[in-house]
Image (spheres, rainbow, N blue to C red):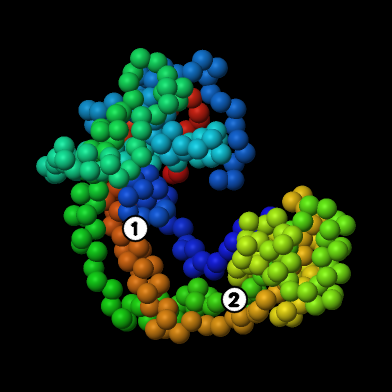
Amino acid sequence: MLPHRSPDPGDRPSMKRVAASLALGLSLWVAGCGEAPTAPGPSTPLPPQTVIARIGDENYTHGQFREFLAERFPESSNPIPSNNKVLSALLDEALNDRLVLKEAVRQGITVSAKEVQEYLQNTSLTSPKSEIHPGSTPPSTPEQRARDILLTEKYLNLLLATVPPISKADERRYYETHGAEFQEPERYHIEEILVKNEPLAEAVLQMLAKRKSFESLAQKYSENSMAKRGGDLGWFARGELPEQLEKAVWGLKPGAHSQIVKTDYGFHIFKVKEIRAGYQLSFDAARPGIQTALGQEHKNEILAQTIERLRKETPPTIEVQKLDFKYISEK
């Protein structure tokens, strides 16, 4: 079964790991490995109080890192990574978080109890599960986490207020040097009828041959979640559909339907409702996206420079021999 899909803006190119790490680690400001999984470290789990890194006079423990990981990967469908390169990058992110938090405290930024409670009322922060943070060392409370997040948020507010304004000349230069980002591809508006057995699919094909309405047949027979909408899946560009389905659809004219396509979900029949030709966005139409992209680039640069400065002022020391994975430095 295919999900309903609408066109999304093109992804921005990735930044240096330090900028991306802060962006992902803090999850407050910026949106945002091919290594095969490795075997876990010591057969005996590390005690949560084991110090795995130091930032100035602050000890950073295995328990705190597990808490960071549990917060980053809360769903069972999104398990905590187990390869060395990813875990190394995540540890760097966690230490960057602590550096920024320490800087917020050093600068005298404060958070009131009222602000903490208001934040907790609008979020779902909970203490990590005991099996994620075993042992006697207690995990951070939601109140502690809310305070840390708000302190960091206030610091970043002050920091990113220094982002310079974007000139129209900068916007024009970006538009002229990133033309491919503003090329809208040809898109197909696709509808689907999905049934569980082939005889019914054949019967639907025969009804379509007699000019029965595709949308009414989808409403009556389809088991797709979009059946009530006449099987409307939305707009797709090349490369956004599985290859088997793309072959069945691409090349059809508006109003035409495919033959039966068998997949693990059942038996599909697709219809191309309409086709929208590709086109180049005008500069004026592209400007909002350009402003967002340039603003994000400037923010990332400031964040990366800040992290680099904080790491030079207070270099984190990682106790690599105490980790339960092999630390891989980016350098």
Can residue 26 be seen here? The reply is yes
Above or below, comparing residue 13 to residue 331 in the picture:
below
Q: Quadrant of the C terminus?
A: top left
Circle 1: residue type: Asn
Where disc 2 sits, the SS reads loop
Q: Which residue is mark 2?
A: 185
- Residue at left offset 51%, top offset 15%: 44
Image position, residue 274 (x, y; %)? 65, 79
The N terminus sits in image quarter: bottom right
Residue located at (69% from left, 70% from top): 215
Left or right position of 214 against 5: right
Please give the label number shown on residue 300.
Answer: 1
Q: Is residue 251 visible?
A: no
Foreground pick, 282 / 210? 210
The residue positioned 36% from the left and 68% from the top of the image is 292
> Helix, strand or loop at disc 1?
helix
Among the two numbered marks 1 and 2 on one chain, the one whose residue lies closer to the N terminus: 2
Measured Cα–Cα span from mark 1 to mark 2: 29 Å
For image coordinates 31% across by 63% down, the residue present is 298
Asked whether 34 or 81 is in front, the reply is: 81
